Amino acid sequence: MHAIGKDDLEPLAVGAWILGTGGGGSPYLSWLNMRRLYAEGASVSLMSPDELADDDLVAVVSNMGAPLIGQERLSSPDFALKPVRMMEAYLGRRFRAVMALEIGGGNAFQPLMVAAMSGLPVVDADSMGRAYPEAQMTSFAIAGLQMFPCAVSDIRDNDALVTRAASWPWVERITRSICVQMGSIAATCKAPRTGREVKQFGIHHTTTRAIALGRAVRDARARHDDPVAAALDTAGGKMLFRGRITDVERETSGGFLKGRVRLAGLDADRGSRLDVAFRNEYSAAWRDGAVLASTPDLICLLDSVSGDAIGTESLRYGQRISVLALPCAPIMRTPRGIENVGPRAFGHDFDHVSLFSDESAKGTVQ
């Protein structure tokens, strides 16, 4: 176990935003919250999954909702801790540690805020290795683990506890409905996981990976090197396209941000176009009408100059974008993983063909 230093926070924000694949909420406001908490004397410890005892209990936390709403409402550490305390009261047992549901976007900071407020350590793991929009899109769901109870809270005085559900998709439906009624943004504490479950089915060392990715981008900027190339090298990714945004279709519906963005090619890609679909996160890309990439490979849109990730809520006409693909966690490429997070799970009528070998996925993510 070691401390997450104040100097790790900015690289974590940069790296987690890239791994968010457009979703997970912008880390900016949560990063500011953590800077303030550290300035006031707070500290957070990061523990390896291997340090958990099999019967330890781990809180899996997230900020749920549409990214556009998350940008309009300030995040709050008290808000992040609320459902964790509600879950402890329901279980009659205290948590040993806390971990992220997803390492992508602002949700990388959700366990840090809980840890700063509670003194619990953060487990260096999550259940997606990126960001995804729905409850059944986790490694724990793919492994067939129990999906309840689940606690949901808002910034007012509203709490909800789902004590039982028929399936992972039902957990998603019920909690999403609650989230919409709470204003399309809510803090959650998902089904508690044992130390054994985290060690066996969690996606390990993703906080460390996000910090390393963000530090590579930040250091490349400082050296006036290409930050996009630094991200590719560090994450073992592939460049898909360079272009300028010419059109964005986007709507907030049912607690999701849905739409499509179109880019006209620049440099070596001049004369071609790229279309990218998203539901909170980028899910598929077509080059001149032919499928180029799809989930579960990570599709990331970065500012071509700064290397900063571009969230689906921040897409604007004229932005110069580099589109990258990064390998996913191996569990996402299993048959059950493809069923839960492959292109058909997002409504696309084609099968997934990965841009990466199995070995590259193993080496990069776990």
Image (cartoon, grey):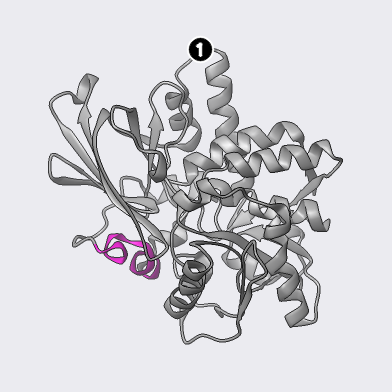
Q: Is residue 349 visible?
A: yes
Looking at the rendering, the stretch of residues picked out in magenta corresponds to 336-347
Taking the image as shown, residue 348 lies to the left or right of residue 22, namely left
Q: How many marks?
A: 1
Q: Position of residue 117 (x, y in %)?
A: 80, 55
Q: Position of residue 242 (x, y in %)?
A: 28, 28
Q: Is residue 277 visible?
A: no
Main SS of residues in magenta: helix
**Residue 342 is covered by the magenta coloring:** yes
Taking the image as shown, residue 19 lies to the left or right of residue 323, namely right
Q: Residue furthest front?
A: 156
Residue at the image position 26 percent from the left and 53 percent from the top: 353
Label 1: which secondary element: loop
Q: Residues within 10 Å of mark 1 (few under 14, many from 20)?
A: few
Q: Is residue 64 above or below residue 32?
A: below
Quarter of the image for residue 41 reads top right
Quarter of the image for residue 201 reads bottom right
Q: Is residue 111 above or below residue 92?
A: above
Q: Residue furthest right?
A: 41
Judge by depth and name the residue closer to the eye, 84 or 222. 84
Q: Position of residue 328 (x, y in %)?
A: 43, 51
**Residue 283 is covered by the magenta coloring:** no
Judge by depth and name the residue closer to the eye, 23 or 249. 249
Judge by depth and name the residue closer to the eye, 69 or 362. 69
Q: Which residue is mark 1?
A: 224
Residue at the image position 26 percent from the left and 28 percent from the top: 243
Judge by depth and name the residue closer to the eye, 309 or 153. 153
Q: Position of residue 297 (x, y in %)?
A: 37, 50
Residue at the image position 80 percent from the left and 82 percent from the top: 92
In the rendered structure, which amino acid carries the disc numbered 1? Answer: His
